[in-house]
Image (cartoon, rainbow, N blue to C red):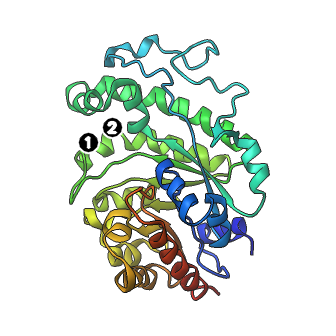
Amino acid sequence: MNGKERVIATLNHQPTDRTPLDCWLYQKQFVEKLAAEYGSREQFLDEFGIDIFVGFVPYPNQFGRRFEVSELATLRLDDPGEAKWIAFKDWNPDFAGVSVSEAVEQQGDRRAIIAHTWGIVEGTSTFLGIEECWANLGLEPDLMMAWFDRYADWLCGLVDSLAAAGVDIVTLSDDWGSNQTMLFSPRMWRRMIKPYTARVVAHARARGLYVNLHSDGYILNIMDDIIELGYHALHPVQESAGMDPRTIKQDYGDKLVIYGSLDVVDGLYKYEGEALDRYIAERFAVYAPGGGFIFNTGHFVQPDIPPARLVQAYTLARTLAGQYGS
């Protein structure tokens, strides 16, 4: 199987020749260290059989001006001259210096293409600021839902653009969790965030895209909702925040692909040598049986991690991945 076939089969809970692999090598200083001590990012991806290419879509608020929550009516979604929003007529964002369609052409079937986009809360925060966004969830709930409604329309336009460019998967990045609890109550999330997320997920699925949720933190108390929304995968399943891997695999492993498991702080940074090998082997032993697992770092690999340690981790991961295929 090639990388794209392997990832798509995993997302469909079908047999594969091995567990798919990914690695978030997007932190500039670490990539420079890797190049100096090991080789280029591209060399690493090829040598360790990385099956996914992730392109990060620019934030919608390109000019960074902060808005008041009451200013929603002044924003236009359909005006190509409107500087506050990216217009989607004939739009093709850059992935690491190349357009989406160029990235798709360059990768071919070697890797599945993920477009990493900014979900309902994270995207809206680029206009209001994080503090204002969070505060107004409580202070101005109706206005905030109006923002989310408008932003969901914008995201659906983005999905259309990405689907036309040929991506395979869209990630909605929306951190909903903190340590041992959510950033807002499940009741608030279900009332104010879930309906607009549901619209975007449904639109992406209707366009033939697979949908991944990136959410750091503890979100175990809305896992049934995440399944209901129609997500295909979840990244990263943050154990350090209280997400129990065995519970996730047992209760949701047949419904949702686990995309992650290598915590960059409490795994890759914390352990070395045999301890790191044990850490990785334990996660494969939990997540990989029966499929539905894509091994990946939980976030960007950071510059305080020795490149040799990453090479060690993926040398073992490549071996273990081959032990969990059909």
> In this figure, which residue is indicated by the disc labeled 2?
192
Farthest front residue?
36
Q: How many numbered discs sit on the rendered protein?
A: 2
Picture quadrant where residue 73 is located: top left
Q: Position of residue 247 (x, y in %)?
A: 33, 75
- Callout 2, which amino acid? Met
Local crowd size for mark 2, using a 10 Å CA cut-off: few (<14), some (14–19), many (≥20) = many
Residue at the image point whose x is 41% and y is 83% from the top = 277
Q: Which residue is mark 1?
A: 188
What residue is at 65 percent from the left and 27 percent from the top?
Answer: 88
45 and 85: which is toward the camera: 45
The image shows residue 285, relative to residue 64, as above or below, that is: below
Whether residue 293 sits left or right of residue 248 in the image: it is: right
Compared to residue 323, the image places residue 180 above or below, namely above
Q: Position of residue 258 (x, y in %)?
A: 47, 68
Image quadrant holding the N terminus, namely bottom right
Density class for disc 1 (Cα within 10 Å; few <14, some 14-19, many ≥20) is few
User: Residue 66 at x, y = what percent?
Assistant: 36, 19
What separation in Å lies between label 1 and label 2 (alpha carbons)?
6 Å
Task: Choose between 124 and 320: the one closer to the eye.
Answer: 320
Q: Position of residue 286 (x, y in %)?
A: 41, 82
- Reply above or below: 49 against 185: below
Q: Quadrant of the C terminus?
A: bottom right
The reply to whether the C-beta atoms of the residues labelled 1 and 2 are less than 8 Å apart is yes
Circle 1: element type: helix
Q: Amino acid at mark 1?
A: Met
Res 234 visible: yes
**Numbered disc 2: secondary structure:** helix
